[in-house]
Image (cartoon, grey):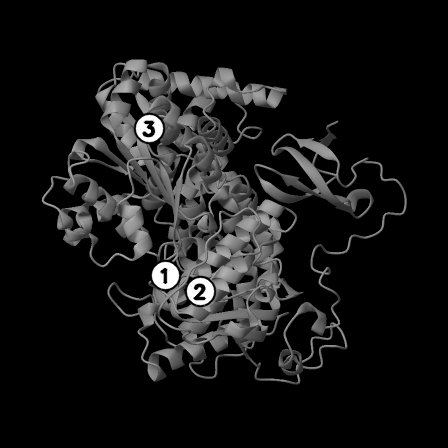
């Protein structure tokens, strides 16, 4: 009957089945590039066209505003229907709409305001000040995550399980925060969800109204839903036993990569069970990539155990093999990357914006940026900033500039209260007025400022002066290490939820300095602030390594950034690439400890998540895919020798083409078996080819043997409690006496190395 409708033309059989499903709950496993947005929108259009439901009876949930807009535009193009009145939007957007309609019942003022993450943090800081909460013991950022985590789990202050004094204090703050929000008539993002859920749960009339109204509920990116979002779906749609709505969940469990944000890949299996799903349709036809790329992705993800299972296929043919490249160092990798990109653009006719370079950690971008910059290739960092433009790097550089030139007012203003040291805007304003009156720099005007503000400013200047006294005779690398340590920048970012990336970037700045002095011919051990340098042969300029590095950073930050609309190479992290596609993709840094990341190595779920991340990375490529790894890499100012990633061994050999390194005589010195990578690659590349050991070697680094029973009493496999990170399990203990440290896996905060002389770990039995 429905074959006549033009809507259904050009759908493949699986897509057609999904679009024309009967009115009951179903799960659509939609692989990468299989046209899931198309299926969702066509399904809505088909339901409307065949009069199964009116436009008010559809609820469609997406994860981003961008996806919601795209869905509405496509619907408008398909049908003459007013989409504005339809409930299509993100979880937060729809909950906001719901609460606006029922504000009285939700106990909210009609004009309630929404706090974004920044506003929420400010509100918590204000509250801590009022109630005398110690922000050293309870950093506002951590309280913010604690509150968000409780709301995600659907817990109000009274529902939280209090086991110790610390949690008790956090719950008290949570209660105070709740009261403050209620008084001020504001809600945060977590509250939008939780309050909507509670209203549906506690008010039968409203619940039944919406269940009768929304006959069809459609959810996109279902694998990224968290505990509360899934509970909300169950509440608004109703389970089959309650004669609920038909729920169509579309997702791909292989692309669930947001566990760190609370996403539960297990929601999919729960959905199949709780909604009694009879129809599981797999969209396996891929319209994006050639089969060599898809077969590699299928083989890789096949190593994950807890999958619902699907295999992508294509009609486009095998295409080119996946190219694998091994370099001797991260510099060599970046150089090869630039040469290969040039060839792609000049020789093979690829446009630059269709070439993407993906990396697992933000800090990796620096070496690539430098190589592209030096080669004059325009590039753009997607979803983030170029290395020298990142806030944390700019802060560190501002400290270096002040050391070099105390009268640099711009740098002074940037860091006078960062990390926060209680110097407010009013104090700064007074200082600016004083400096203006005296006609001197802010630094010099500090001595004229009186009172409490004057004392804090004097403390800041004293810290800078002490650092300046410590730096003569130091190398550039040592100076940066002093700055990172003494200013408290690293410590500040360690307390932030998303701070790990920023700490990595700051540590990468040490590498940047190291490679800069080597490349510019100063030598690694050159004194950074020495002025008696030989003049530059070209322009006669005399520059200390520090001044030269700061100039380089300023130039590289401002220049060569692709202009809007310009054809440029795309650089991004694998997380940022989700949902995008490119003609040619480079995945760099495929080494154990980097990808898969070392934080995930000891945890089965963590490793599965990394593999899903790799799957997302592979499936971004349409025509060409390059995988590269390097035998050595500079990390945290030290050269590391790497084993290639296990993911390379999980790819099907017939899809790969190993590009032999250019210098076949290279030997790492790690073992006699590695006379040349070229020889190693003639046979099937696998762990066993090098004398680095069997396939088991990579699991964990060797732990030094402990001579006697240590005094701290902490042992491997022991459960312990830490005041900041909560409960965790000890994975390894190494070192003795004051140097003893333990590696502990904390479910909420990941794997951490803790110095036992500092960290107080209490065994939990």
Q: CA distance from mark 2 to mark 1?
A: 8 Å
> Which image quarter holds the C terminus?
top right
Counting residues from the start of the chain, the first of labels 3 and 1 encountered is: 3
Question: Residue visible at 41% across and 63% down?
Answer: 313
Q: Is residue 179 above or below residue 10?
A: above
Q: Are marks 2 and 1 in contact (CB under 8 Å)?
A: yes
Q: Position of residue 27 (x, y in %)?
A: 38, 42
Q: Relative to residue 341, is residue 247 depicted above or below?
A: above
Numbered label attached to residue 294: 2
322 sits left or right of 115 in the view: right
Mark 2 and mark 3 in contact? Answer it, CB < 8 Å.
Answer: no
Q: In front: 277, or 230?
A: 277
Task: Give the residue displayed 44% in from the left and 78% down from the top.
Answer: 340
The mark nearer the N terminus, 2 or 3, is: 3
Residue 286 - label = 1
Most foreground residue, 459 or 367: 367
Per the image, the residue denoted by label 3 is 237
Give left or right: position of 719 versus 38: right
């Amino acid at each position: 009957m429905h074959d006549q409708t033009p809507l259904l033309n050009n759908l493949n059989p699986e897509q057609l089945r999904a679009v024309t499903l009967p009115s009951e709950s179903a799960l659509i496993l939609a692989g990468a590039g299989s046209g899931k947005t198309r299926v969702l929108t066509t399904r809505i259009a088909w339901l409307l066209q065949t009069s199964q439901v009116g436009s008010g009876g559809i609820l469609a949930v997406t994860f981003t505003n961008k996806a919601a807009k795209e869905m509405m535009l496509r619907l408008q193009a398909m049908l003459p229907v007013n989409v504005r009145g339809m409930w299509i939007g993100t979880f937060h957007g729809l909950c906001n709409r719901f609460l606006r309609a029922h504000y009285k019942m939700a106990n909210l003022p009609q004009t309630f305001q929404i706090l974004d993450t920044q506003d929420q943090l400010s509100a918590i800081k204000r509250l801590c000040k009022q109630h005398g909460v110690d922000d050293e013991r309870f950093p506002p950022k951590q309280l913010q995550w604690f509150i968000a985590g409780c709301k995600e789990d659907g817990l109000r202050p009274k529902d939280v399980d209090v086991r110790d004094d610390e949690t008790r204090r956090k719950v008290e703050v949570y209660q105070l925060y709740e009261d403050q929000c209620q008084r001020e008539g504001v809600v945060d993002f977590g509250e939008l969800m939780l309050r909507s859920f509670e209203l549906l749960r506690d008010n039968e009339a409203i619940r039944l109204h919406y269940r009768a109204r929304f006959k069809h509920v459609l959810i996109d990116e279902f694998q990224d839903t968290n505990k509360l979002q899934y509970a909300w779906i169950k509440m608004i749609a109703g389970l089959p036993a309650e004669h609920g709505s038909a729920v169509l969940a579309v997702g791909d469990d292989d692309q669930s990569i947001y566990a760190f944000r609370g996403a539960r890949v297990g929601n999919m299996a729960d959905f199949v069970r709780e909604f009694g799903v009879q129809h599981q349709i797999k969209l396996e036809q891929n319209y994006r990539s050639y089969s060599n790329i898809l077969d590699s992705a299928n083989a890789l993800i096949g190593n994950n155990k807890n999958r619902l299972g699907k295999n992508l296929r294509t009609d486009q043919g095998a295409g080119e093999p996946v190219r694998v490249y091994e370099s001797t160092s991260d510099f060599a990798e970046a150089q090869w990357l630039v040469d290969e990109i040039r060839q792609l653009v000049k020789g093979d006719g690829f446009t630059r914006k269709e070439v993407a370079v993906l990396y697992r950690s933000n800090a990796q971008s620096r070496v690539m940026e430098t190589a592209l910059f030096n080669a004059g290739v325009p590039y753009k960092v997607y979803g983030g900033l170029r290395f020298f433009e990142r806030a944390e790097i700019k802060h560190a550089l501002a400290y270096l500039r002040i050391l070099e030139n105390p009268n640099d007012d711009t740098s002074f203003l940037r860091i006078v209260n960062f990390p926060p040291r209680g110097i407010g805007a009013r104090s700064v304003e007074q200082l600016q007025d004083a400096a203006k009156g005296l006609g001197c720099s802010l630094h010099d005007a500090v001595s004229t400022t009186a009172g409490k503000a004057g004392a804090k400013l004097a403390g800041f200047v004293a810290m800078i002066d002490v650092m300046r006294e410590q730096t003569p005779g130091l190398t550039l690398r040592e100076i940066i290490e002093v700055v990172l340590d003494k200013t408290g920048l690293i410590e500040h970012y360690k307390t932030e939820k998303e701070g790990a990336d920023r700490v990595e970037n700051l540590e990468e700045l040490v590498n940047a300095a190291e490679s800069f002095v080597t490349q510019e011919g100063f030598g690694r051990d050159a004194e950074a602030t020495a002025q008696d340098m030989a003049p530059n042969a070209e322009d006669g300029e005399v520059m200390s390594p520090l001044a030269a590095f700061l100039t380089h950073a300023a130039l590289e930050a401002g220049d060569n950034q692709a202009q809007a609309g310009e054809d440029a190479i795309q650089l991004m992290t694998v997380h940022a690439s989700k949902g995008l596609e490119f003609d040619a993709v480079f995945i760099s840094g495929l080494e154990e400890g980097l990808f898969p990341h070392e934080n995930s190595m000891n945890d089965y779920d963590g490793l599965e998540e990394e593999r899903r991340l790799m799957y997302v990375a592979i499936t971004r490529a349409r025509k060409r895919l390059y995988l590269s790894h390097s035998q050595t890499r500079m990390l945290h100012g030290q050269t590391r020798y790497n084993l290639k990633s296990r993911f390379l061994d999980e790819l099907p050999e017939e899809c790969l083409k190993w590009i032999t390194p250019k210098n076949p005589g290279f030997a790492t010195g790690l073992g006699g078996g590695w006379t040349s990578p070229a020889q190693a690659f003639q046979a099937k590349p696998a762990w066993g080819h090098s004398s680095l050991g069997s396939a088991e070697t990579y699991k964990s680094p060797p732990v030094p043997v402990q001579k006697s029973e240590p005094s701290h009493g902490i042992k491997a496999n022991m459960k312990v409690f830490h005041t900041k990170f909560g409960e965790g399990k000890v994975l390894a203990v190494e070192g003795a006496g004051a140097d003893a440290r333990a590696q502990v896996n904390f479910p909420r905060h990941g794997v951490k190395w803790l110095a036992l002389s500092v960290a107080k770990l209490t065994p939990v039995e």
